[in-house]
Image: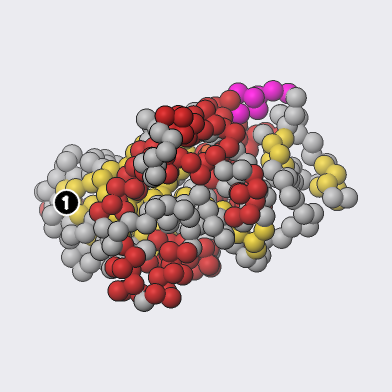
Amino acid sequence: MYLEQKGCVLNLKYENKIMTKPVLFNGGEVHRSVYLDEEIFSEEQEKIFSKSWLYLCHASQIPNSGDYFTTEIASQPLVAIRQSSGEVKVLYNRCPHKGVKVLSEKSGNCGRFLRCPYHAWTFRTSGELLSIPVKKEYESCTFANCEANAGMKLVACVQNYRDFIFIRLSESGLPFDIFFGNSLSTLDNMVERSPYGKLRIVGKALRHRHRCNWKMVMDNQTDTCHPMVAHESSAGEAIKLWSETQEGQAKPPMVVELFSPFMSSHAFFADMGIRIWPNGHGHTGVSNSIHSDYSEISGYWESMIETYGEARTKQILGDTRHNTVYFPNLMVKGPIQSLRVIRPISASETVVESWIFELEGAPKEMLERTVQYNNLINSPCSMVAHDDVEMYERAMEGLKSQASLWVNIARLYQPGESWEETKETVGTSEIAMRNFYSMWQSMMEEENA
Ligand SMILES: [Fe+2]
């Protein structure tokens, strides 16, 4: 109905086909309501965020029995808890008695059981109801048949993939391996960059609130034609200043090394390539990327060879993927060991969480580079992030215009593009965005069971 209200063409002729139902994505264009409409946003929560595999946290955040991490996904308060068996379980963070959030801190250790602060109902870390004050008074009533008797509810599906904890709220949906397929190779690569094959999250998330739709941030991750334009005033200026004042110095400092590739040409980004996988995932930087030419850090290469041997080390470190987009709301950067979770708040509000990892067994300078990158590029105090945020906010304003109903993502569009296979093409193609919206559309069109 929202399309009729907003005047969308319902019988759209596209590629000589008459589309007879409302069209939100027509192959090369996305309808503006996809970014603006609160009704579509609510539908996304139900049809996409409850049925997709979503990243929740990293196992290194809850290393010991009783350690927990709380978050909210698709408006659901959740808590991941390490069990005494070592397993990680994910519960709805809600007391079955009166609905109170049992844990209010972001993270901590709950000991051997959870206790609701309202009436002292207690639960095992697996959610099972352990004790209730004045229990006798429940014995003669119908409590045994009540939902509350089952304790804190477990999330339907949890998958620990190499210490990355993913959940799916709904019982129905694609199995984990099918949903992600070969896209998991980006997570594999980040793990293998540790000489011990182990990652550890360092510090807390940098959180940055954007006044825009969450999909604009996702689009940006594989948009290779914006850095040299949108970041000219930040990265471009930093590079210019360095060259004007420090000319002759043999080696630029780390910050300049991290900034410089942002100003690479369209040809550079075209040559680095782009790869897509089924179900909306993809990454930029197939043959090389903006992360390829960082200086060598003393001792790292040697420690990698010790674990993997020279040939395998070359393979691991030679895979310098730029941004890997995991449908619907995760972005991973293997070569700089970071990830970003794009959290939708409303149609016009998004929070971006940036997390960083230490490579266990690697020299400390590797972590220093990761911290530096995160502060420079992803922090709310970053110079670069604000360039993008301004563009998203201006787009939210501009899309209100009646001038056009469509956002264009047709660069290097091939009519009849399909999404069932892994595909590689020119890095400046917007194929990864089209792949994303193809998945988005197919999930939005699914009828509820
Ligand atoms: Fe950007």
Residue at screen point 52% across, 28% down: 233
Which quadrant is home to the C terminus?
bottom right
Q: Is residue 355 magenta?
A: no
Asked whether the viewer can see residue 171, the reply is no
**Residue closest to the eye, 29 or 105:** 29
Q: Position of residue 272 (x, y in %)?
A: 59, 55
Q: Is residue 415 left or right of residue 218?
A: right
Identify the residue at horizontal 46%, vertical 70% (top origin). 315
Q: Residue at x 54, y 39 (%)?
A: 263
Q: Give coordinates of residue 405: x percent, y percent.
A: 73, 32
- Answer with the quarter of the image where residue 36 lies: top right
Q: Residue at x 75, y 50 (%)?
A: 413
Tell whether 376 sits left or right of 266. left
Magenta span includes 396:
yes
The x and y percentages for residue 113 are: 15, 55
| Residue closest to the eye, 267 or 408 | 267
* Residue interval drawn in magenta: 395-402
Q: Quadrant of the N terminus?
A: top right
95 displayed left or right of 33 = left
- Give the residue number, with chain letter if any, for mark 1: 109
Residue 259 makes an appearance in the image: yes
Residue 334: image location, x then y, percent: 43, 56
Quarter holding residue 100: top left
Please tell me whether residue 111 is drawn above or below residue 381 in the rendered image: below
Amino acid at pointer 1: Asn
Residue at far right of view: 16
Residue 391 vertical placement versus 193 (above, below): above
**Helix, strand or loop status at disc 1:** strand
